Amino acid sequence: MTASKLVVCSHCQGINRVPEDRLQEGAKCGVCHQPLFDDKPVELTSASFQRHVQHSDIPLIVDFWAAWCGPCKMMAPVFAAAAAQFRGRVRFAKVDTDAEQGLAREYGIRGIPTLILFRNGREAGRMSGALDSRSLQSWIEQHI
C-alpha cells in the first residue's frame, strides 16, 4: 500500500489525503474537484495561510512580496517556474505584505522578497533577497 500525504486545495481550502505516487499525476480535490496543483503559486491571505502551513504534509515555500518592489517583480517569473518544476513535491505560495501586514509582522519580514520554507507546520528555512533560477533551485533542493 502506498503512503499518503495531506494536501490543502488552493481553490476551496479542503484537506485531501493523496497517495504519494499520485501527487505529481494531476490529483484533484475531493471537495471541489479542481486540480490540487496548478503549476503556479497560490495566493495566500491571513484567512488561508495557517491552513496551508498546519495541514499539509508537503513542504510549503512562501514568497513574501509587494507590488511596488522591483526585486519582487524580477523574481516572480522565476518563482512561478519553480512552482511548475517542483509540482507535487513542494507547494509554492505568495503573500502580499501590503495586503497582509499582520502576517508580515508575525513572521518578522524586514525586507522583501523573503522566502520562508515551512515543513510540518514549522519554519525550516528562510532566504531574503531576489534569487535567479539556479540559486532558487539550489536553495529549494537543500531545504526540502
Image: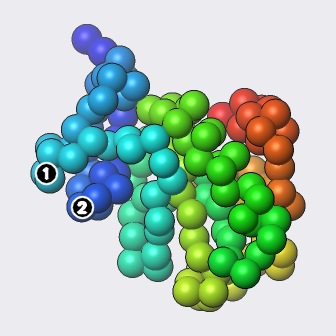
Q: Residue 58: percent from the left, percent from the top?
A: 48, 40
Q: Residue at x 15, y 45 (%)?
A: 33
Of the residues shown, which amino acid type is indicated by label 1? Answer: Val
Please give the label number shown on residue 92.
Answer: none
The quadrant in which the C terminus is found is top right
Binning the other alpha carbons within 10 Å of mark 2 as few (below 14), some (14 to 19) or many (20 upward) gives some
Is residue 121 positioned above or below 4 on the image?
below
In the current view of this chain or complex, which residue is farthest to the top? 1
Is residue 143 positioned above or below 76 on the image?
above
Q: Residue 112's quadrant in the figure? A: bottom right
The circle on residue 31 is: 1
Residue at 61% from the left image edge and 40% from the top image edge? 81
In the structure shown, which secondary structural element does the residue marked by tag 1 occupy?
loop
Rendered residue at 35%/18% (across/down): 21
The residue labelled by disc 2 is 12
- Distance from the alpha carbon under mark 2 to that under mark 1: 8 Å
Residue toward you, 67 or 106: 67
Q: Nearer the viewer, residue 31 or 113?
A: 113
The reply to whether callout 2 and callout 1 are in contact (CB within 8 Å) is: yes
Label 2 sits on a secondary structure element that is loop
Q: How is the image coloured?
A: rainbow
Quadrant of the rendered image containing residue 142 = top right
Going from N to C along the chain, the mark reached first, 2 or 1, is: 2
Is the N terminus in the top left, top right, bottom left or bottom right quadrant?
Answer: top left
Q: Residue 99: x percent and y percent?
A: 55, 86
Name the amino acid type tagged 2. Answer: Cys
The reply to whether residue 38 is visible in this rendering is yes
